[in-house]
Image (tube, rainbow, N blue to C red):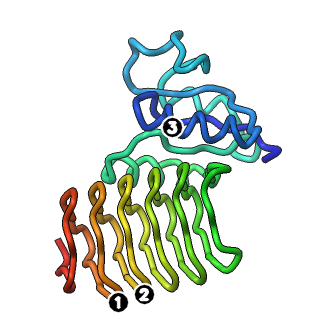
Amino acid sequence: MSVPVIIVGAGGHAKVVLEALRRCGTEILGLVDRDPEKTGKSLLGAPVIGGDDAIAEYAPHDIRLTIGLGPISQRRKLFDAFKDQSYEFANVIHPAAVVSDSAKLGEGVQIMAGAIIQADARIGDNVIINTGASVDHDCVIGGHVHIAPGATLAGGVHVEAECYLGQACSVRQDVRIGRGSLIGMGSVVLAGVPPG
């Protein structure tokens, strides 16, 4: 990626994003965080350059952003706020992830180490496919979804927007998970889940 990146958030998930960007050879300008105590410090050697307002020092066409936070509600607010200011979000795909050539990825998608995205999967904007998660053929993942480490989705699963699928959960083929749903860690999902 030729355009440098700023990571929004400087916590645990930001470490994973930072390392994935480094492995891709992406230039990282730094991180921003709303906690003023973090400004001037570093995270894995990358500087925390200020709060969210530090991004305004860069023109939208000069940088890309990526979100270093896991919680869906925070990610959605940040994504929408910066899109409203004409900023664009980088896709972060760890080199140890496998992404089918026929998969379609939205903007600001993060696919972490060991994750697998199979043929004709469609991934919405601002989605995290976390470490070792598997999204099989023909799945549709709505915007602002977080699929936690080790989660497994069989073929044809449809996950509506703003859902969280917990660690090591398994979802049977062709199941639909309604908007805003929370699937607990280790759950086995055999039937549709209503919204919320």
Q: Few, some or many C-alpha atoms within 10 Å of disc 2 (few <14, some 14-19, many ≥20)?
A: some
Q: CA distance from mark 2 to mark 1?
A: 4 Å
The residue depicted at 21 percent of the width and 65 percent of the height is 183
Circle 3 — which element?
helix
Q: Disc number at residue 156?
A: 2
Q: Which circle's residue, 1 or 3, is located before the other in the chain?
A: 3
* Spot occupied by residue 33 in the image (x, y as percentages of width and height): 45, 27
Front-lying residue, 44 or 180 = 44
Circle 1 — which element?
loop
Q: CA distance from mark 1 to mark 3?
A: 30 Å
- Residue 107 visible, this angle: yes
- Residue assigned mark 3: 16
Q: Which circle's residue, 2 or 3, is located before the other in the chain?
A: 3
The residue depicted at 46 percent of the width and 50 percent of the height is 131
Whether the residues at callouts 2 and 1 have beta carbons within 8 Å, the answer is yes
* Spot occupied by residue 175 in the image (x, y as percentages of width and height): 29, 86
- Residue assigned mark 1: 174
